[in-house]
Image (spheres, rainbow, N blue to C red):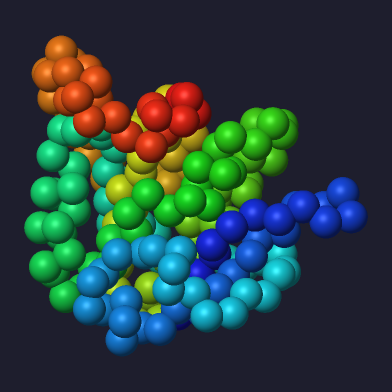
Amino acid sequence: MILPTSLKYSDNSLYIVYSTINIDEFNKNKYYDDCHHEEANIYTNDSKIDAYPAFFIFHKSRCGSLLLTEMITQKQDMIVFSEPHIINQCLSLDIEHKLKVKLLLTIITAFCNECNKFNKEAVFKFSSYCLQYIDMFNIFQTTKKIYITHDTLEVLKSNLINPTNEIRNNRI
């Protein structure tokens, strides 16, 4: 599979970096993970949409979203992209909203079109950071959105007891 893995700036232009992912390795654990890429080619992609994501999973941290993700990975016809870094990169860019939406559309479309080649549906589990941008994902009108939450006080306690890397590094 050739999937978008990151964004790169060069000569005042923004490029999507695509990486080759071994499909057999991917089918074993069904998680998208940056450590699986073998090579990267840089180019822009304005391809048409052949497939849409089956689901978007948004969540409050420490709420059971990993459990749902693991359950979905049991379906042979779905691939779960769990918190792809490139989505966070895109959403955190300081660029015009219209351009950000187009970039998001291009990135997610690339994932879905690649899954479609293998007769699989794409499911995206986003980091809790992405929840603030949930309205941007309305460009995918046929995609179902799942929101998972948990008692806020319990989430705060859990993050204080065992903080995530983002909290430890003051990145949120």
Q: Residue at x 50, y 42 (%)?
A: 88
Identify the residue at the far right of this view.
Answer: 11
Total labels: the figure holds: 0
Q: Could you say which quadrant of the image residue 54 lies in?
A: bottom left
Left-right relation of 146 to 52? left
As drawn, 154 above or below 5: above
As drawn, 127 above or below 168: below
Q: Is residue 49 visible?
A: no
Residue in front for this viewpoint, 131 or 160: 160
Left-right relation of 70 to 54? left
Relative image position of residue 162 (x, y in whole percent): 22, 30
Image quarter hosting the N terminus:
bottom left
Left-right relation of 111 to 103? left
Q: Could you say which quadrant of the image residue 168 lies in?
A: top left
Left-right relation of 92 to 132? right
Q: Residue at x 38, y 37 (%)?
A: 165
Relative image position of residue 25 (x, y in whole percent): 31, 82
Relative image position of residue 141 (x, y in whole percent): 39, 44
Q: Could you say which quadrant of the image residue 95 lies in?
A: top right
Relative image position of residue 121 (x, y in whole percent): 29, 67
Q: Is residue 6 visible?
A: yes
Q: Residue at x 31, y 48 (%)?
A: 125
Q: Residue at x 59, y 79 (%)?
A: 39
